Image (tube, rainbow, N blue to C red):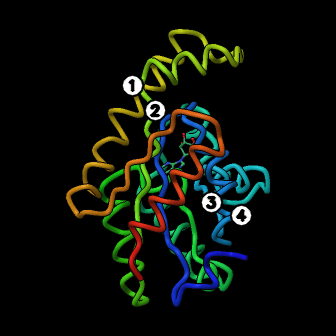
């Protein structure tokens, strides 16, 4: 039984976690547990590129260079996706968005326009040394020591201020991401169920 069946409102979440923190796996588990829609802006951009759309050709060079797509374009895409009936009915877990405080502010604005609110921001915490070790053990080609350090540093520079922004608004649930997948998801569900009041 989906936990959503006991709720008067669908669950609306944002998830943060460094690369190597197991965010993808935990998103899948959240989708199964709460019946929410997984919304990844990175996936949306990659789909637009694969479809050869106007937006796709605009963002392709930005993704290739590892930069950030403009707030305007990203927010417009999320606005459009949040209006779909599946998301309206089932709620969502946003992954990869927001990446700037302007996007975070826009997200809360978009939700309040439709009388909705964000239930929680989950921060999947895994220490830097641990994710570095996990990424190294995966041994992918782009996982050189330097590449790993660079991506993790970018995360700290870019994303940590956004988490702090949500923290100031009392929305952040910190979840220890160390342990077996099911242990982490049990912790996650307990945090969500305990931290979300409606
Ligand atoms: P991800 O799969 O989340 O790592 O996203 C892949 C790429 O898509 C990023 O490196 C950015 O170029 C772009 N992207 C994804 N989400 C956002 C966002 N919220 N704001 C700006 N650019 C984004």
Q: Are marks 3 and 2 in contact (CB under 8 Å)?
A: no
**Which is more toward the observer, 26 or 83?**
26
Q: CA distance from mark 1 to mark 3?
A: 27 Å
Say which label, 1 or 2, has the lower sequence index.
2
Determine the residue located farthest toward the left in the rendered image: 168
Find out if the beta carbon at label 1 lies less than 8 Å from the nearest ligand 1 atom: no
Residue at (36, 69) in percent of width and height: 106
Q: Secondary structure beneath disc 1?
A: helix
Residue under label 2: 126
The picture places residue 165, in percent across and down from the top left corner, at 25, 54
Say which label, 1 or 3, has the lower sequence index.
3
Which mark's residue is nearer the viewer, 1 or 2?
2
**Which is more toward the observer, 187 or 27?**
187
Residue under label 1: 153
Q: Are marks 1 and 2 in contact (CB under 8 Å)?
A: no
Determine the residue located farthest toward the right in the rendered image: 51
Residue 32: give its label.
Answer: 4
Residue 19: give its label.
Answer: none
The picture places residue 120, in percent across and down from the top left corner, at 40, 65
**Which is more toward the observer, 21 or 3?**
3
Question: With respect to residue 73, does 176 lie above or below?
Answer: above
Residue under label 3: 30
Q: Are marks 4 and 3 in contact (CB under 8 Å)?
A: yes
The picture places residue 16, in percent across and down from the top left corner, at 46, 48
Say which label, 3 or 2, has the lower sequence index.
3
Quadrant location of the C terminus in the rendered image: bottom left
Q: CA distance from mark 2 to mark 4?
A: 23 Å
Crowd around label 3: few <14 · some 14–19 · many ≥20 (10 Å)? many
Left or right: 177 with respect to 59? left
């Amino acid at each position: 039984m989906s936990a959503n069946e006991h709720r008067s409102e669908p669950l609306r979440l944002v998830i943060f976690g460094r690369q190597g923190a197991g965010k993808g796996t935990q998103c899948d588990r959240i989708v199964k547990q709460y019946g929410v829609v997984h919304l990844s802006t990175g996936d949306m951009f990659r789909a637009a590129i694969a479809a050869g759309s106007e937006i796709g050709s605009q963002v392709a060079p930005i993704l290739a260079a590892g930069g950030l797509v403009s707030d305007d374009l990203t927010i417009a895409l999320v606005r459009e996706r949040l209006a779909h009936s599946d998301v309206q009915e089932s709620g969502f877990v946003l992954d990869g968005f927001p990446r700037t405080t302007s996007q975070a502010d826009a997200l809360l604005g978009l939700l309040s326009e439709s009388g909705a609110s964000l239930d929680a921001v989950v921060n999947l915490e895994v220490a830097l040394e641990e994710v570095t070790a996990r990424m190294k053990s995966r041994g992918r080609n782009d996982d050189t020591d330097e590449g790993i350090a660079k991506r993790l540093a970018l995360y700290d520079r870019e994303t940590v201020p956004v988490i702090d922004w949500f923290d100031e608004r009392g929305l952040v649930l910190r979840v220890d991401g160390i342990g077996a997948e099911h242990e982490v998801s049990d912790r996650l569900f307990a945090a969500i169920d305990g931290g979300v009041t409606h």
